[in-house]
Amino acid sequence: MPPVPSIPFVLASSPQARPRVVVAPSLLAWGLATLLLSGPAAQPAWAQEPQAPASETASGNLPRVEVRARSNTGALRSPSATGLDLSWKDTPQSLHVLGEQAMQDYRLYSVGDALGSLPGIYVERFETDRSSYFARGFEINNFQIDGLGLLPGRFTGLEDKGDTAMYERIEVLRGAGSLLIGAGNPSATVNYVRKRPGSRFQAQSSLSLGSWRERRLDVDLSSPLNRGGTVRARLVLMGQGQDSYLDRYQQDKTLAYGVFEVDLGEDTLLTVGASKQQRKTRGGMWGAVPLVDKNGTPLDFDRHVSSAAAWTRWDVSQDEWFADLSHSLGGGWQARATAMRMTHSGRSQLLWWSDSPDPQAGNGGLAWPSRYDPDRKESSVDLRLSGPFEALGRRHELVLGAQAGRSELLELSTEGDSLGTPLPPLAQWQGQFALPVFNGTRSGSDLKDRLQSLYAAVRLRPSEHLQLMLGANHSRLKTEGKSYGNAQDADAAHTAPYLGAVWALTPELSAYASHTALFRPQGELDAQLQRLQPVQGRNDELGLKGAALGGRLTLAAAAFRSQQNHLATYAGQHPVQEAVAIYRGQDTQSQGVELELQGQVLPGLSLHAAYTQLALKTRQGEAARLNTPRQTAQLGAQWQPMDGLRLGAQFNWRSEVRNEQGRRQAAFGLLDLMASYALSPALRLGLNVRNLADQDYLHFSGASQGYHGAPRSLSASLSWRV
């Protein structure tokens, strides 16, 4: 069984996470296509960059910004931390945003690529189609969509290959963010912000071709649907196919996203939408290539080598439906109700290389073929009331909210009849393994999670220069059902406080501090196949945020310290039920610093630089989680030397990592370049180069398998907007 300790929804089950269900294309999306394509041609409502002035965003006519390494974080306003609409400078934690322009410029089409481009985020790619995301030494498992928190841990639905085409921006709040979600985690909270319609018809389309037969077409349309513009719609369609540098690996994916906005009155806005993503993979790896043999000798293999058999496949379908009703109560007060439904299904047949290669026996390991069919459903409802109030001669803000969520997981794993068959030595492997009959042992899970949460936060201004953020979340998470024959019933409740303060030292510089209590139930099993006790701990952060050059340049520095007790740490596979990964609780501490600078330093020239250093240890002071880099750095620039021409470069570096067997990946950096030129006001030609230096490096987790990262690749795109 592949040791994949960090997959949120695997829990105690086999790390064979892969999905199924094929659903017919959304009627909403195709209805929108008919409506929008019948409208007049004009220009698309681009995802609103957070720095656009209110006067411009109100009409939906957003300014085109030609030079931007990424969104202007200093002008960002986000409710991700507390539910309050706080600016970047007033948020007592590290906050960063990746805007649509940067995602387009650097072709950050997958969720994994987008998150990996952000400072302080480490993407651990342990397989071809799944990844884990880390910040400050810990896995990220707090996710939001449009500010609505997804249920913690078991199912996020946003895998490494999920597409970014329907997102306006991605916000990352580093540090603990338990106030809105109720599950404290000192890594980060990721908020995916969907695109919304504009007030006039606008359109964009892009065609791109690249290495390994990559081809992609996306269309983005936005339009009012009546004369008064009180009903608006937006449609995003995407299709992409690609082979790979890895043997036998190829993937096709599609996306359809549609959203309506309806002004029910001057003070009431109704938003409804739906999306569908489908992915079909052939030759994908379950686990990866063995890195050491039975003697502990490191194994070398070419960059193209894959452990997948020729018959492996992994098909995924993910559907989302959502509705949002907001009403202005006057005096700045607003009531909001949000509901979301998500289904994620899959069907796969995969091969894992169990056991290590045995030079004496002349084999490359033992075959573990399996078919895995999961269905996951998640529903969430959030009710929120927010607004200002006067007290002691000053204006303050308050938010009150309640959230209820439910998720269901039904999965079935069936072993193939060739289980335990010796595989050929790695040097002779070409995917030549007969398709088995999947009639072996059947096992799986039937689990239900229910979350109930109440939260409140207040921003107080006791003086002109001081702001205090006080809040608390009371959550109850109840689990019922079985996983691979083992009862998973649990019922945990906890109240987590949140404290933050921001002190304006000067008009350009502020200092902040925050404290968050941590509490998070865990689904992982120990060696006795019992659930681990919940994680408990704390997270503290101190920092400075400032601006220079008239606000064009922002600077931030943060020092953080967090402690998690009983944190699940992978301990291998169960000796009897080998399909079950087992874990042990470990007390772990993380502390470090983050530095970041970004903005326009000269006319036409934007820079971005970031550096993170951390120490990650057990309570006994021993180094922990050595597969997590202790240092990461990032340097980016974007330059417009002349009208219509935009040039960019981004360099990402990380320090050494190693796995449990001592296999090391030395420190390395990857350099990506982009260039685009406006052929006309409507047409733009783009060119991208990834891994310019053709750096050879390994992907692996803490386990004993891995594979080579992608070599240098090229792509060209032609985009149209009117």
Image (cartoon, grey):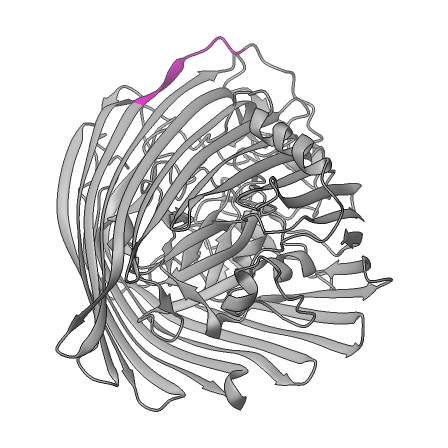
Q: Say which quarter of the image contains residue 680.
A: bottom right
Considering depth in this image, is 219 or 652 the residue closer to the camera?
Answer: 219
Please name the residue shown 45% across and 45% down the image: 703
Residue furthest out toward the front: 227
Name the residue at 21% across, 60% down.
457
Q: How many marks overall?
A: 0
Q: Is residue 318 above or below residue 132?
A: above
Indicate the position of residue 653 as horizontal and vertical percent values.
57, 68
Name the foreground residue: 603 vs 121: 603
Position of 221 compared to 59: left or right?
A: right
Q: Nearer the viewer, residue 102 or 131?
A: 102
| Image position of 523 with respect to 677: above or below | above
The boundaries of the magenta stretch are 438-446
Name the side, left or right, on which 168 lies relative to 209: left
Q: Quadrant of the N terminus?
A: top left
316 lies left or right of 303: left
Q: Give the answer, above or below, for where 675 lies relative to 293.
A: below
The quarter of the displayed image where residue 250 is located: top right
In the rendered image, residue 517 lying in the magenta stretch gets the answer: no
Instruction: Give x and y (percent) for residue 370.
Output: 50, 20
Residue 5 visible in the snapshot: no
Q: Nearer the viewer, residue 488 or 190?
A: 190
Residue 30 in picture, x, y percent from top left: 64, 28
The C terminus, quarter of image: bottom right
- Is residue 323 shown above or below 411? below
Look at the image and tell me whether residue 649 can be seen.
Answer: yes
What residue is shown at x 36% (from left), y 31% (from top)? 378
Q: Position of residue 271 (x, y in %)?
A: 45, 41
